[in-house]
Amino acid sequence: MKRIILFASGSGSNVENIVNYFQEKPNVTIAMVLTNKRDAKVLDRCNRLNISALYFNKQAYNNSDTVLNLIKDVNPDLIVLAGFLWKIPEKYVEIFPNKIVNIHPALLPKYGGKGMYGDNVHKAVKENKETETGITIHYVNENYDEGSIIEQQKVALFPQDTYQEIAQKVHHLEYEYFPKVIERLLQ
């Protein structure tokens, strides 16, 4: 049995998509979802999906081993960042090398780094009149969005696309490819 831990900070649409994808795969389990926001909508989704979900604060994450020990107890095959906005502490990366993956809503190395998430990315892509964008699934290292790239998928953009339409195109790629790449990494 392969075990996944998901980290999320927001609504949890990618979490729900991943949970649904793996429901029909008896050899994979979503062991738990962890969130750094007490009021994150992902908690409501997990409750509805009957998935264990826990909130943690900055103290438990950065200044103690509370969250780290929780992860160690689960002993996951993969830790998946699905819309998680905090930087992963270096000790997590050292303890779980090549086991932490993230999805970024742009074609890295473009539009990566601190503060480049969600609509911030899509607005920057629009402002720079890019003709394409996409997703990057990558391993996590000690720096934002600089880990080794696992896979990228692209989508064409048109001058009339709004940043909201760009976001929709990127979400479509996330929902289609992220679970498949996770499954491949588990094999």
Image (cartoon, rainbow, N blue to C red):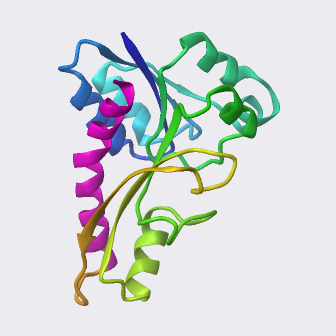
Residue drawn 71% across the image and 32% down it? 94
Q: Is residue 58 above or below residue 24?
A: below
- State the image quarter where residue 98 is shown: top right
Residue drawn 60% across the image and 10% down it? 73
Q: Quadrant of the N terminus?
A: top left
Does the magenta run of residues contain 119?
no
Task: Pick whichever, 186 or 46, lies toward us.
Answer: 186
Residue 36 lies left or right of residue 26; in this view the side is: right
Q: Is residue 42 above or below residue 120?
A: above
Q: Is residue 31 above or below residue 9?
A: above
Number of numbered labels in the structure image: 0
Task: Pick whichever, 56 or 152, lies toward us.
Answer: 152
Whole-percent x, y for residue 151 in the image? 37, 51
Whole-percent x, y for residue 26 in the image? 23, 12
Residue 66 lies left or right of residue 136; in this view the side is: right
Q: Which residues are magenta?
A: 163-187
- State the image quarter where residue 29 is shown: top left
Q: Main secondary structure of the magenta part?
A: helix
Does the magenta run of residues contain 183?
yes
Whole-percent x, y for residue 65 in the image? 76, 23
Task: Pick whichever, 108 or 42, lies toward us.
Answer: 108
Q: Quadrant of the C terminus?
A: top left
Residue 91 lies left or right of residue 43; in this view the side is: right
Residue drawn 40% across the image and 72% down it? 122
